[in-house]
């Protein structure tokens, strides 16, 4: 479906990249952008429904599939980095133990509520459910799940709750840029998830040159310190990506 006409640069982005995009606003020398953030599944749905989009930021796997289907410009995909799924608590609260699977299980069972992103359309949310099932506690904690449209919204709600016994679980990037919550750490070995996020140009881009410049800003060497500080990690050496 053809995207609606728009002025400036239109972004559809996974919530995991919101902190980075916001931090780069002052460095951008180009047309103003309008950004919409949410779960990766919701961003894919928005693209396919014809929402304005010049640049899409989602998981690399999703971007690759959309490139293969002709919905993104071939060869435009560029990785931002790898993001881990982590655990958060309200700022100032003593962190629960998540050193291993057993400790994680105890801490989740003791939590008054679990703040998570959409468990069907978000990467982290779907993983949280998988972890709860593996730990054998999904049915026990299901009523305590507090689900939100994205990890960013979930972490903002966790901060606002002030609940010292609540736990949040989403992508580390969404935890780090949300005031009022503290990163406890990544999920322990055997339960971890690392997700590569990439930016790519939509097939119906209004100005391809400006979209490419924006992706260069997001993924280039100048923004590397910001990406690292925001939770994006280096990609494994065996990562392969088609060059334009």
Image: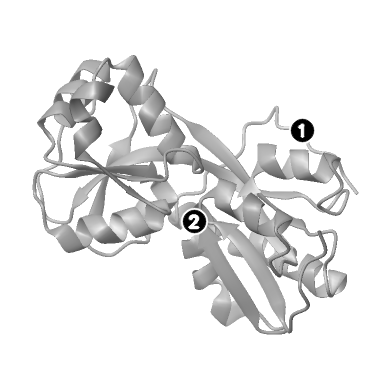
Q: Position of residue 116 (x, y in %)?
A: 33, 44
Q: Is 138 above or below relative to 17?
A: above
Query: Counting other residues with Cα less than 10 Å from the Cα at mark 2, is it few (<14), some (14-19), or many (20 or more)?
Result: many
Q: Secondary structure at mark 2?
A: helix
Q: Is residue 206 left or right of residue 104?
A: right
Quadrant of the image containing the N terminus: bottom right
Query: Counting other residues with Cα less than 10 Å from the Cα at mark 1, is it few (<14), some (14-19), or many (20 or more)?
Result: few
Q: Which disc, if any, is residue 76?
A: none
* 59 and 24: which is toward the camera: 59
Q: Residue at x 44, y 39 (%)?
A: 124
Q: Is 226 above or below relative to 140?
A: below
- The disc, 2 or 1, on the residue closer to the chain's N-terminal end is 2
- In space, the residues marked 2 and 1 are separated at their CA atoms by 24 Å
Q: Is residue 220 left or right of residue 241?
A: left
Q: Residue at x 74, y 80 (%)?
A: 6
Q: Position of residue 14 (x, y in %)?
A: 55, 54
Where is mark 2, residue-wise? 15
Q: Secondary structure at mark 1?
A: loop
Residue 241 visible, this orientation: yes
Q: Is residue 102 left or right of residue 163?
A: right
Where is mark 1, residue-wise? 240
């Amino acid at each position: 479906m053809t995207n609606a006409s728009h002025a400036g640069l239109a972004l559809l982005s996974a919530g995991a990249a919101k902190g980075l995009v916001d931090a780069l606003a002052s460095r951008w020398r180009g047309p103003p952008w309008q950004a919409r953030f949410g779960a990766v599944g919701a961003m894919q749905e928005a693209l396919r429904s014809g929402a304005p989009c010049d640049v899409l930021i989602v998981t690399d796997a999703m971007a690759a599939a959309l490139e293969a289907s002709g919905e993104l410009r071939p060869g435009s995909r560029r990785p931002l980095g790898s993001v881990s799924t982590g655990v958060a608590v309200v700022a100032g609260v003593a962190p629960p133990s998540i050193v291993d699977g057993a400790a994680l299980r105890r801490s989740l069972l003791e939590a008054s509520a679990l703040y998570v992103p959409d468990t069907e359309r978000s990467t982290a949310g779907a993983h949280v459910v998988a972890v709860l099932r593996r730990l054998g506690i999904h049915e026990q904690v299901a009523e305590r799940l507090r689900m939100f449209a994205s990890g960013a919204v979930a972490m903002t709600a966790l901060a606002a709750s002030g609940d010292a016994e609540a736990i949040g679980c989403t992508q580390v990037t969404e935890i780090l840029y949300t005031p009022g919550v503290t990163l406890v750490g990544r999920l322990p070995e055997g339960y971890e998830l690392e997700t590569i996020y990439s930016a790519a140009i939509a097939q119906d881009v209004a100005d391809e040159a400006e979209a490419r410049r924006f992706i260069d800003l997001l993924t280039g060497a100048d923004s590397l310190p910001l990406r690292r500080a925001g939770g994006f990690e280096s990609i494994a050496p065996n990562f392969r990506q088609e060059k334009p």
